[in-house]
Amino acid sequence: MLEAKNVVKTFDGFRALDGVSMTVPQGAVYGLVGPNGAGKSTIIRHFTGIYRPDSGEITLDGQPVYENPAVKGRMAAIPDDWYFFPQASIREMARLYAGTHPFFSWDRYHKLREVFPLSEKQPLRRMSKGMQKQAAFWLTMSCMPEVLVLDEPVDGLDPVMRRQVWSLVLGDVAQRGVTVLISSHNLRELEDVCDHVGLLHRGGALCEDDLDRLKLGITRLQFALADPADFETVRAGLNLLKCSQQGKLFEMTVRGTETETLALV
């Protein structure tokens, strides 16, 4: 289980994370969503041990992640801006990964050559962004991690390769019980692959839950009012998450079941 407890992080007086607490259950595919600036990449860098919290804890199975090689060896990550040595090829980077990840599998590396049609000898800097992202998955999945952390993982990939990558990731979840944490703006795509979701807003976790339960607890309404001023009366008692208005037409997203919401309205 990957867990954050009351994590606070401040940069030059700006509080990027404000007491974030979230739990990624073992074997789950957890989607982390939120607007730009919500703190998604910052909490991802805490989970991978890049940042040290100002206060709070980041743990894997109760063990701290930061400056803990034994715990980090069980994890692998693909950040939004994946780093590679400019002159390196995939094969050279594979040797680096094999030296830093104790469970790196050369057998799997060779098998994944069939999934990713890339040259092992071509310098990575000469590849397109999509090809570099494929290389990142090739190398990372060869590490055989127990925990996989992905930040905007499929940006730059074509639809066919997206399906192949998700199939590969979900196959590891089903066969090896891998725990996956995904940060993405693509809510529709996360809905296809995630079973848990956490919502971040302004550095604090708004809510997290099983995706099916979360979806069942949200209702969207569209209605027209003869007098738009009556809106405040209509919304009374509702847990309003979002609202938009065009003249007399209103759209509301509220927390609560359809039956409960319609009864209140």
Image (tube, rainbow, N blue to C red):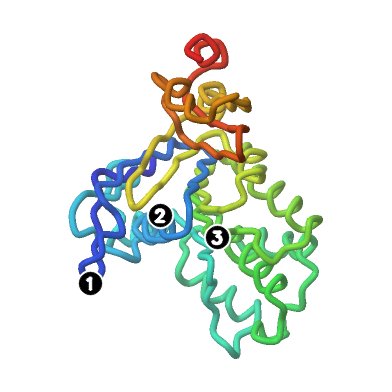
30 to the left or right of 159: left
- The local crowd at label 2, few if under 14, some if 14 to 19, many if 20 or more residues have their Cα within 10 Å, is some
Q: Which residue is mark 3?
A: 143
Q: Earlier in the sequence, mark 2 or mark 3?
A: 2
Q: Which mark is residue 245?
A: none
The CA span between labels 2 and 3 is 30 Å
Depicted 141 relative to depicted 97: above or below = above
Residues at discs 2 and 1 in contact (Cβ within 8 Å): no
- The local crowd at label 1, few if under 14, some if 14 to 19, many if 20 or more residues have their Cα within 10 Å, is few
Q: Which residue is mark 1?
A: 12
Q: Earlier in the sequence, mark 1 or mark 3?
A: 1
The CA span between labels 1 and 3 is 36 Å
Could you say whether the residue bearing mark 3 is in a helix, strand or loop?
A: loop
Q: Residue furthest front?
A: 227
User: Amino acid under label 1?
Assistant: Asp
Residue at point 55% right, 10% down?
Answer: 259
Q: Position of residue 109 (x, y in %)?
A: 67, 64
- The local crowd at label 3, few if under 14, some if 14 to 19, many if 20 or more residues have their Cα within 10 Å, is many
User: Amino acid under label 2?
Assistant: Ala
Q: Position of residue 221 (x, y in %)?
A: 60, 25
Q: Which residue is mark 2?
A: 38
Q: Position of residue 261 (x, y in %)?
A: 51, 16
Q: Residue furthest bottom?
A: 87
Depicted 240 relative to depicted 180: above or below = above
Quarter location, residue 227 = top right
Which dot, 2 or 3, sits closer to the camera?
2
131 to the left or right of 40: right
Depicted 137 relative to depicted 126: above or below = above
